[in-house]
Image (cartoon, rainbow, N blue to C red):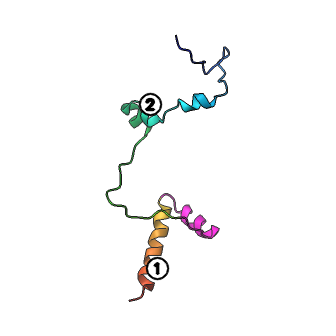
Amino acid sequence: MSKRKPLTDADGEVRELTAADLAKFKPASEALPPELQETLGIRRRGPQKAPTKVATTIRLSPEVVEFFRGLGAGWQSRVDGVLRDYVAKHAPR
């Protein structure tokens, strides 16, 4: 018989989780079978073959961020494209 305290009480209410409970948790990618992960859309990205971009933090005007985010997914790549065009036009020759 398990010595672990059940997660729910007699009324079916979930009890408050402790640090010990949380320490036993595993990521879904480790706990679920591959078929279920695929069904749920849980995917792991493989390592980059060659890093093509550098992670950085940049502060932009709210209206700039709003504009690019408003264009939908891939907005950061579009900002990168605009900056690449600027560099190509303004780089010393």
Magenta region includes residue 68: yes
In the figure, residue 48 lies in which quadrant? bottom left
Q: Is residue 84 above or below residue 5?
A: below
Element at label 2: helix
Please indicate whether residue 32 sits to the left or right of residue 11 in the image: left
Magenta region includes residue 67: yes
Residue placed furthest toward the left: 49
At horizontal 37% and vertical 32% (from top left) the residue drawn is 35
Q: Which residues are magenta?
A: 57-73
The amino acid type of the residue labelled 1 equals Tyr
Element at label 1: helix
At horizontal 49% and vertical 33% (from top left) the residue drawn is 26
Q: Which residue is mark 1?
A: 86
Quadrant of image for the C terminus: bottom left
At horizontal 43% and vertical 30% (from top left) the residue drawn is 32
Q: Is residue 60 above or below residue 2?
A: below
Q: Is residue 63 above or below residue 21?
A: below
Q: Nearer the viewer, residue 53 or 36?
A: 53
In the figure, residue 88 lies in which quadrant? bottom left
